[in-house]
Structures are given as C-alpha cells and as structure tokens.
Image (tube, rainbow, N blue to C red):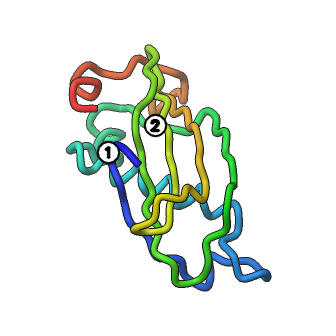
C-alpha cells in the first residue's frame, strides 16, 4: 500500500452471520481512513465547513471485494490520491490484513468538493490542493 495508512480492528458488530466483515463496513473503514488522512494533512472537516463553507462528499465508488476479513483482525486501510479534477479528487483505497500484502478490498473513490450551503460543486481551494 502506498500513501496514507490507518489501522482499524474488526469488531463483532462489523461482521455478518458468516463471521466475516459485512461488505458495507469496508466503505465505513475507508471513510474513516479518508477523514484521518485529511486530519493528518491539517484539515478538520467540521472546520472546513464552518470556516471555508465547503465539504467533501463521495460522488462515486467502485469497490472490489477480494478476500474476507474476520472478527478481531487488524486491518490497514490506505488512502492515496490518484487523480484530481477542478472540484474532485479520486483516491485509491486498499484494505489489507495488518502486516500482510494481500489486498482484501480495493476501491476507487471519487470525492467532490461542495459548497456547504448549496451542496453544489465548487473548486477545491489552492491551500488544500497544495497540502494534498
């Protein structure tokens, strides 16, 4: 995995009746990793909304589920920018078992920069692009 990495432990509540991580929870793990990635760059999403009048929202996600994760596994979730648009960023996010190279889940996630009031696309400010 390249780029930012965030570690998460799989809790019982994250699993389905088969004892594996429920597919939608991978998206939750990725959301948290993107939030922590932005925080590591110095951007708190609530402050961006309050002070800059902007927010980021997922526009699209293409997800491939490759192998299961189980209760009590520690997972590494990555976030790496692979594309930039005028008002969007595209990230690759992979989930691996901590310390292992096997990708369990891989996604291409496009996030849009939105005006917090109108919920319409707006350009990503230069001060953010410079850091990311």
Secondary element under disc 2, as helix, strand or loop, is strand
x, y percent for residue 103: 55, 55
Q: How many marks?
A: 2
At 45% from the left and 75% from the top, the residue drawn is 74
Mark 2 and 1 residues: CB-CB less than 8 Å, in contact?
Answer: yes
Query: Is residue 70 shown left or right of residue 49?
Result: right
Give whichever of discs 2 and 1 has the lower sequence position. 1
Residue nearest the observer in this picture, 51 or 44: 44
x, y percent for residue 95: 52, 57
x, y percent for residue 98: 42, 69
In which quarter of the view is residue 47 placed? Answer: top left
Few, some or many C-alpha atoms within 10 Å of disc 2 (few <14, some 14-19, many ≥20)?
Answer: many
Query: Is residue 78 shown left or right of residue 27?
Result: left
Q: Mark 1 highlights which residue?
A: 38
Nearer to us: label 2 or label 1 = 1
Secondary element under disc 1, as helix, strand or loop, is helix
At 46% from the left and 37% from the top, the residue drawn is 56
Task: For the C terminus, give its image quadrant.
Answer: top left
Q: Mark 2 highlights which residue?
A: 56
Query: Is residue 97 shown left or right of residue 125?
Result: right
Placement of 124 over or under 1, stated as above or below: above
């Amino acid at each position: 995995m390249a780029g930012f990495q965030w570690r998460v432990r799989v809790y019982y509540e994250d699993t389905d009746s088969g004892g594996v991580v429920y597919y939608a929870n991978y998206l939750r793990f990725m959301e948290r990793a993107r939030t922590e990635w932005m925080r590591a760059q110095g951007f708190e999403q609530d402050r961006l909304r309050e002070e800059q009048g902007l927010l980021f929202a997922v526009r699209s996600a293409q997800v491939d589920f490759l192998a299961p994760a189980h209760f009590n596994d520690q997972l590494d979730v990555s976030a790496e920018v692979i594309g930039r648009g005028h008002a969007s960023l595209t990230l690759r996010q992979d989930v691996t078992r901590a310390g292992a190279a096997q990708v369990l889940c891989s996604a291409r996630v496009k996030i849009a920069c939105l005006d917090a009031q109108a919920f319409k696309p707006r350009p990503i400010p230069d001060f953010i692009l410079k850091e990311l």
